[in-house]
Image: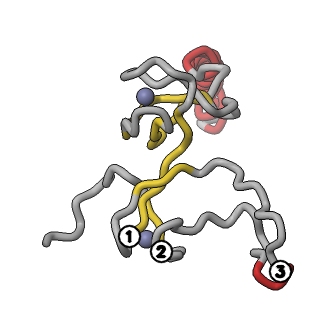
Amino acid sequence: MGTQVAGQKKGPVVTLILVILVALFFIVKQAIPKKYYYTADLKCESCGNVFQQKIAAGITFPIKCPKCENKSAYQAIKCLDCGEVFTMKPVPIAPGAPEEMMPPEMEMPKCPKCGSMNLGPVFEREKATSK
Ligand SMILES: [Zn+2]
Ligand SMILES: [Zn+2]
């Protein structure tokens, strides 16, 4: 006799949870923007301005520099060994360079000053080290 009561009680609760889940799904779906933006470290080749800017994923470089307004800002990276800040634009292959000297991966950035591959963000996200 008592078993039927337990089964009847479950019905409305399950429906309510489903309604909440569907509502949440639509809220989350609307909240996510179509374009993905991220904060990038950038350096202007014209004036040397190093800055941070939110850029859309898949953007084509160079982008506009907020200081001199030239379209010459590339993504920048910092050498952790010598502190040099340099841009990561595709480097043209030097004419006459021996093939053995070519890096196997052109995507691999390297410090133009000391040749170190110990690189990191220009602007520290966390202050972990103290000098
Ligand atoms: Zn500039
Ligand atoms: Zn370096």
**x and y percentages locating residue 77 in the rendered image:** 48, 55
Q: Is residue 108 above or below residue 101?
A: above
Mark 3 residue type:
Pro
Q: Residue at x 61, y 64 (%)?
A: 109
User: Do the CB atoms of the residues marked 2 and 1 lie less than 8 Å apart?
Assistant: yes
Does the beta carbon of the residue at mark 2 sit less than 8 Å from ligand 2? yes
Q: Residue furthest bottom?
A: 100
Which of 40/1 is in front? 40
Element marked by disc 1? loop
What is the quadrant of residue 63 in the picture? top right
What is the quadrant of residue 31 in the picture? top right
Q: Which mark is residue 118?
A: 2
Does the beta carbon of the residue at mark 1 sit less than 8 Å from ligand 2? yes
Q: Is residue 90 above or below residue 52?
A: below
User: Do the CB atoms of the residues marked 1 and 3 lie less than 8 Å apart?
Assistant: no
**x and y percentages locating residue 50 in the rendered image:** 37, 40
The residue that disc 1 covers is 80
**x and y percentages locating residue 71 in the rendered image:** 57, 23
The residue that disc 3 covers is 98
Q: Residue at x 56, y 39 (%)?
A: 74
